Image (cartoon, rainbow, N blue to C red):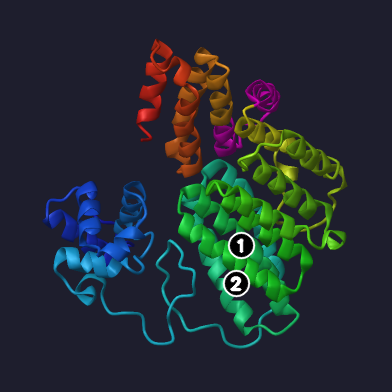
Amino acid sequence: MEDLPDIPAWAVRLRAARREKSWLPKDMVRQLIEAADDHVRAHLPTRDSLLRMLRMWESGQRRPRDPYPKLLAKVFGLSEAELFGAPHPVGMTPLEPSSTVDLTLYPPHQGPVAPELVMYFLEQLPGHYQADMWLGPRHLIPTVATQARLITELAQAADAPVRRGLLGAGVAYAALLGWLYQDAGDVDQSGRWRTLALDMAHRSQDPQLISYALTNKAMLAIDLREGHTVVDYAEAAMADERKLCPKVRILALVHQAHGHSMLPVKNKDMVDRLLDRAAGLVDQVDDEHPWGNACRRTLGYIDVQRATTYVRLGAYREAVALWDRILGGAPESARRDNGVFWARQAGALAAIPEPERAVQIASATAAIVEGTGSARLRQELRAIPQRATAWAGTAYGRELGEIIAQFA
């Protein structure tokens, strides 16, 4: 396939250099690992993550960041300038954290910032959330990243109160990007955007946004399997509970429940109490904030959270009963989310065990992965065999192994 004209020149050079060596992508990853010194090698991500990063570099979706330019230059026996071209001009360095798009660098915004821009950005958020449910992160990250970086630039130029309005919009966009990168499996970028969201929330001085940003930090800690960290962030989000709207309190309570379901000592009663408190607030959600509306968008939102925690707690039959009820009325448009839920349902069925249903659902769910680019969905599918050990040697077990093998 010929290189597309809008791929950055450095990405074309990077791909050409690899092909000149007759290296497959997996060979390139091995060379990168071998080129790193002991200190750098200890901090490199997994080979799968490096493969995904290499594909993004070669397609121009993301420019390599330290330490990768040095490693790539070393592997090919070139200088960084030969491989990537001249560095960015002084004073024109892209805003951090970096996005997956290689933006053309223009002079920063000059002059006053129109207050109407705050509403312009906020009005686009619901559309991004809807697109995420169908597309997943792969196609949405470049669009949202470009807007998030523009918001950050405008906030630097704006006077109060426009600046605070832009910071509020920036929190929402940075949190959404944190989520998209988390769903794509890029934990480092997710963490950077979620930290930026918390920074901007503090600058906005809005207690709702500060608590919302803290719950987003908790969300990332869930995927990192850091139960105590989840609880700490979620409890911090509730520190000023009297000032919080029902929606933010729901998010904090839900994440507390997830955190407690991950602790070494399981406490199902605590999890249920926290989720019951959250359920009692759902009908009170009446704010106009365009962010954090999962409890409105997701059918049976609290049941989804409860079923997810029940799988972690080993309450598989209760989890299956909830998933059957939830997924019976789930809208087809929420393709990626439904796939995650089906994978969790299959995991619970595998543990009961109900092999036939588990395999049937896993097979249907596997088809969604490539279309959405959701690493979270891939991770949920890979977890199913861990709960199917009792029937791994059966025909159903072998079929399940073949389905999951494509995501190894």
Report which residue position mark 2 lands on.
151
Q: In which quarter of the image is residue 392?
A: top left
Q: Distance between the residues labelled 2 and 1?
A: 9 Å
Of residues 387 and 216, the one nearer the viewer is 387
Residue 170 placement (x, y as % from top left): 63, 68
Report which residue position mark 1 lands on.
173
Task: Give the secondary structure at mark 2.
Answer: helix
Task: Give the secondary structure at mark 1.
Answer: helix
Q: Residue 333, relative to residue 115: is it above or below?
A: above
Q: Which residue is drawn at 77% across and 48% down?
A: 250
Look at label 1 and name its amino acid. Answer: Tyr
Asked whether residue 337 is drawn in magenta, I would say yes
Q: Residue at x 45, y 30 (%)?
A: 366
Find out whether the residues at labels 2 and 1 contact each other: C-beta distance under 8 Å: yes
Count neighbours of disc 2 (C-alpha within 10 A) and say few if under 14, some if 14 to 19, many if 20 or more: many
Q: Is residue 190 left or right of residue 74?
A: right
Asked whether residue 9 is drawn in magenta, I would say no
Camera sees residue 170: no
Q: Residue 283, relative to residue 36: is it above or below?
A: above
Look at label 2 and name its amino acid. Answer: Ile
Camera sees residue 351: yes
Magenta-highlighted residues: 315-341
Residue 389 placement (x, y as % from top left): 45, 21
Q: Is residue 7 left or right of residue 145?
A: left
User: Taken as a whole, is the magenta stretch helix, strand or loop?
Assistant: helix
